Image (tube, rainbow, N blue to C red):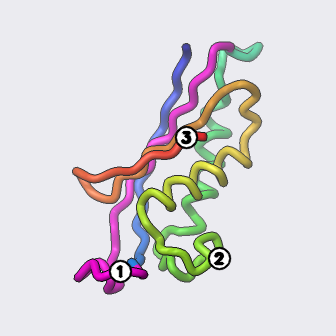
């Protein structure tokens, strides 16, 4: 199995809804780090799972929708709690939809600080 991974950082704000989570219910920022992992059994005619330049361009487009914005205001959350797990799924699905993955699999790990992360893979 071949693997290719890239990661990028961005800052976004949110506040949690639907429960009593103390300060997490107040607007605050996270310095997110997204790690994207592509896995597949076959390389293309150029010896790539996917062109890393295309992957980077697509990832920057995805995170650009959230950078320096409040997640709660984004239509992709549709009034739902902007949890770390949900955000990881939204990012994975958007990125996968922008790429020609063929039989390769794309998963996302999203860190909200140096210790805590959530991941999503279909």
Q: Nearer the viewer, mark 2 or mark 1?
A: 1
Task: Check disc 2 and report its element: helix, strand or loop.
Answer: helix
Look at discs 1 and 3 and give the one toward the viewer.
1
Classify 10 Å Cα crowding around label 1: few (below 14), some (14-19), many (20 and above).
few
Label 3: element kind: loop
The mark that comes first in sequence, 3 or 2, is: 2
Q: Could you say which quadrant of the image residue 17 lies in?
A: bottom left
Q: Callout 2 environment at 10 Å: few (<14), some (14 to 19), or many (20+)?
A: few
Residue that badge 3 annotates: 121
In the picture of the structure, the residue carrying the numbered disc 1 is 19
**Quadrant in the picture for residue 19:** bottom left
Q: Residue at x 67, y 39 (%)?
A: 54
Mark found first going from the N terminus, 2 or 1:
1
Q: Quadrant of residue 106?
A: top right
Q: Along the horizontal axis of the image, is 25 left or right of 51?
A: left
Is 26 placed above or below 38 here?
A: below
Q: Is residue 70 magenta?
A: no
Q: Tell which circle, 1 or 3, labels the residue nearer the N-terminal end.
A: 1
Q: Is residue 105 above or below residue 58?
A: above
User: Distance from label 2 to label 1 (Cα)?
Assistant: 21 Å
Q: Residue at x 57, y 80 (%)?
A: 79
Q: Position of residue 111 (x, y in %)?
A: 35, 52
Q: Which sits in the foreground, 19 or 99?
A: 19
Residue at position x 59%, y 43% in the image: 56
The Cα atoms of the two marked residues, 3 and 2, are separated by 22 Å
Query: Disc 2 marks which residue?
Result: 75
Residue 62 drawn at (x, y percent): 61, 57
Quadrant of the snapshot with the C terminus? top right
Look at the image and tell me whether residue 15 can be seen.
no
Q: Nearer the viewer, residue 116 or 35?
A: 116
- Is residue 105 or residue 55 the one in the foreground? 105
**The magenta stretch spans which residues?**
17-42
């Amino acid at each position: 199995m071949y693997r290719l991974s890239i990661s990028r950082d961005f800052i976004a704000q949110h506040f949690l809804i639907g429960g009593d989570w103390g300060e997490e219910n107040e607007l605050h920022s996270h310095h997110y780090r997204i790690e994207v992992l592509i896995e597949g059994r076959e390389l293309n005619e150029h010896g790539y799972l996917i062109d890393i330049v295309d992957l980077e361009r697509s990832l920057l487009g995805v995170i650009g929708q959230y950078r320096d914005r409040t997640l709660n205001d984004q239509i992709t959350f549709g009034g739902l709690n902007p949890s770390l797990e949900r955000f990881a799924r939204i990012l994975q699905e958007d990125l996968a939809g922008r790429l020609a993955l063929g039989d390769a699999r794309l998963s996302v790990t999203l860190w909200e600080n140096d210790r805590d992360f959530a991941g999503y893979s279909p």
